[in-house]
Image (cartoon, grey):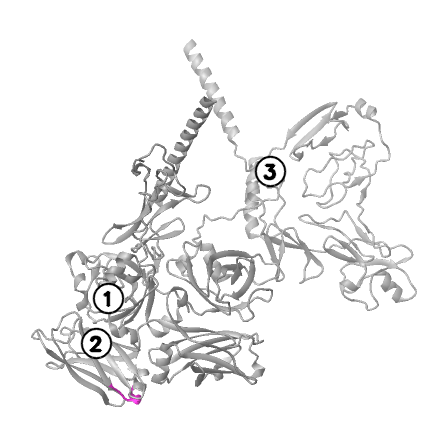
Amino acid sequence: MSRIYTTSQSRLCELTSVMFKILIFSLVCLSQTTLAYGRKHSPLIVDEADGNRRNNRPAVSECQFGKTLRELGSTWYADLGPPFGVMYCIKCECVAVPKKRRIVARVQCRNIKNECPPALCDDPVLLPGKCCKTCPGDKNDTMALDVPAHVEEEERNMKHFAALLTGRTSHFLKGEEMKSMYTTHNPHNIVATGRFMFHKKNLYYSFYTSSKVNRPRAIQFVDDSGTILEEHQLQLPAGPQSIYQNVTGKICGVWRRVPRDYKRLLRDERLHVVLLWGGNKFQTELALAGRIGKYTALQSELFSALMEPAPGSKSDIMSGSGGTAIVSTSSGAASSMHLTLVFNGVFSPDDYVDSPVSIRIESPDRREVVLDEVQKVRKPSSEVNVLEISSPISIQNLRLMSRGKLLLSVESKKNPNLRIQGHIVTRTTCEIFQTLLAPHNVEAKTRSSGLAWVFLNTDGSLSYNIETDQVNARDHPEISLIEDMGKRKAVLEDLTPSFNFNQAIGSVDKLGPKVVESLYAGDLGINIAVEHETSLIRGRLVPRPVADARDSAEPILLKRSEMSTIAPHHAMGMAWLSIDNECNLHYELTLSGFQPHVQDLQIFLEEKPIEAIGAPVTRKLLEEFSGSYMEGFVLGMPSNELVKLESSVCYLEVHSKEKNELLLRGKLKSTKVPAHCFPIYTDNNVPNVYLPGDRNDDLLITADTKCYHSGRFYDETEQWRSTEDTCQMCACQRGHATCEPIKCPVVHCKLNEELIQEEGECCAMCVPQSLNGKEVAVAAGLSEAAGGAEHNKRGCRLGDQFHVAGATWHPFLPPNGFDTCTTCTCDALTLEIRCPRMVCPPLQCKEKEAYRPDKKACCKVCPEGKMSSSRVDKMGPSNPNVLQDQASLKPNVRTSEEILSQGGCKVVNKLYENGQEWHPVLASHGEQKCIKCRCKDSKVNCDRKRCSRSTCQQARVSSKRKIYEKPGSEPAVDECCSTQCKRPRRHHRRTQQQQQQGEQQQTNKRGVSS
């Protein structure tokens, strides 16, 4: 017994070792093929010049292992999914790999089983979740996973950053090794300034650039040596996708999940940003770079300025000059402003120390100087100089500043020709302000809801977009912009004139400085009042950075499902959704009205081709979450699914995971998909052709195959009467709807019946005769009010079709259409359905000589001059798609002895007359319609039907024509040939080869004998 146990144990160990080797091999292959596709992986960029796709891959700073993103420098155990699970002896790491002056993240996995330290006991044990065996009582595992600890201290004091990008700040791009990648030749003195906000491991960036240059192609983050750490494409898709960026002229984006090492570079001000313009295979790209630095004034910035060389200045002297200003204001009892100037290029080569510069703010329209001060720069720098100025300012001048009417200039006191200037406008940061409009009283019975989002333009105007639901225009709603200061709510602007069809879209041109300050402080809101309620619904505007999902055209309102039993009465949501240049789907969701306690929710994306009855619906789970706010993304979404977001009808749904119940639902607007994200179709993409006789399992009809007809969808094999022409019957076959006019049978009424045609019916029918028309109507199945609805009629129902009492019809049997050899009748009195088939007379000629006058004729006839007294029973049907002979009259029945004595055959206890043909029936496969057996003089011969090459070629041509022809017009295809022609003729080639080999052997034998 012990020997058997030892043997089985050894075999088990060998099997485990083999499986482990196989897993290691598969994981190595996976790690080699699974490259680091981050959320900013290589896009297919469309060149503005020629529209060709670019193939350059940007640097990425994270790894993708399966469907999980990993931070650069992180380690984990390989999770192979079910049935294997986590492999604790396979350790993976996301490492940085230098490649052509770029840092690219790669996954590296290795087996750490051989690195386990020896156990110091005789009987070590393997604990769950461990790779190495340890001694009982040991608490520490020497091979524990090295997971970086979350250090929140690194993210403290890392909120706001800024950068100035000029020709002089791009000095590190002028090296010899950089000339092949960039050019810093900037004859137009292009200048840019950026703002950066670090929030939840993400770095949001915003830029103002010179108005004389187009939008940059890409943005790069590099270190001091010029190594590219991350690169994003900045091209916007065509169409109204990013309204915010097109209107404000800003450049917005986000670097998500910044690695820890790069956070340190940002904190230590050793991270640079590079903007790239143009460039192709014949010309290098124009690059502007600048160092990202921390400035205290950014926390209270309300306005910004981008300063360029003043008009009329010499371009050679001012080449590479520029500056930016961080402006903070206060409009209290004593209004004031604070300036932080970051600039260069206003110093001559002789300025070494304590160089005076003049700072001036003026109103060009009024020719009024608001500020004129002289400050000294202790040690002038050719790259970046910083000055801070505080000064009182009047409310009137603050109002001009909020409307972009003030000009800021910085010039050298010694040489006034060295001057840079720019208008003070709203701050550079890309941000919108959004809110959900809900009743302020949770006990309110109103079902009204809505959303609002606003943003500031460069000229100081406020663009607003408000959408409401179930706000009755008869109640005369009043929409206003309010200052929400707790109990005190002051009305600032009336937005009611722009309200139309549940939407209010417009702009407020003249905003005061106090309104701008309140907006950035989060004290503004939207209020909707009606006649009987001063505040029906309202909400406070909250700032959000613009990037990814919030960079789309507009949000959608998620409304409470009326079927929900657990959703709060005032539950609602706001969702943003967009597709970036890398064809990734981004979404953001904000909920309102839910209880603060944590509950598990699910967000689904539902798609249907059109809004119609019975439309096929597909539902995709995007993410599971909890709380009132979430944002996520879907990497590598298939192209065919992305296209549906633009072409199909899509909904966003929020479900309760525990109750599996729909809570909120909202319809998506058409989501713009970049052109390079569409599926690629070529001339070789030929759709599958389904022939009537196909029996291949690969061509089985899927469960979601439906037909669209007359404004709704029908299931496969479903029949219906056309709504466009009630005298047509339609059927759904393999996703195509085919319709055929109703064929009325020939009706012969009895002596006591009368032939009438009811209004709304396609065929005439016989009803019993009566002296008054009322009884005729009742017998015909009508109520006292003739022409009533179907439920008011008497009649019969066959399948899904209703027939009035007394009606006669031919049954509709797709794909053959109407069976004119069968006539069904709904008895006018008993409502009993009878469907007898036509009885054919016996043939007076041989079966082979008989023919069918037309394709759908019910009975065969004998040709003239071929009449014979002998009768032969007709054959069984050879093709199910063609109607065959119907029931024949057999007045004389012969015995089995008579049939056998005249040369008949007996097969499986069944008698066949001499000369009769039939298809054999197998118990396991049924009737074999492609095999024909014949009884001849008491002997049975069976042959399979053979199809010539010309027949196969004709079938292929017919199948291709079927794609372009209208459904129902294609010719009938022989079932046997359609299956046989698909089989490879290997046996023919093999037979020919065998014959050739035999002839060659005979030739060799003859040569030897001679």
Mark 3–mark 2 Cα distance, whole angstroms, equals 85 Å
In this view of the protein, can residue 586 be seen by the observer?
no
Asked if residue 519 lies in the magenta stretch, the reply is: no
The amino acid type, in three-letter code, at marker 3 is Cys
The mark that comes first in sequence, 3 or 1, is 1
Name the quadrant containing residue 939: top right
Residue 121 horizontal/vertical position (percent)? 33, 34
Please tell me whether mark 3 or mark 1 is closer to you in this view.
1
Mark 3–mark 1 Cα distance, whole angstroms, equals 74 Å
**Closer-to-camera residue (97/12):** 12
Determine whether 961 is above or below 524 in the image.
Answer: above
Horizontal arrangement in the rendering, residue 1003 relative to residue 828 (left or right): left
Residue 324 horizontal/vertical position (percent)? 23, 74
Quadrant of the frame with the C terminus: top left
Identify the residue position indicated by label 2 in the image: 341
Q: How many marks?
A: 3
The crowd level at tag 1 (other Cα within 10 Å; few <14, some 14-19, many 20+) is many
Mark 2 secondary-structure assignment = strand
The mark that comes first in sequence, 2 or 1, is 1
Identify the residue position indicated by label 3 in the image: 977
The crowd level at tag 2 (other Cα within 10 Å; few <14, some 14-19, many 20+) is many
**Closer-to-camera residue (371/415):** 371
The label shown at residue 292 is 1
The amino acid type, in three-letter code, at marker 1 is Ile
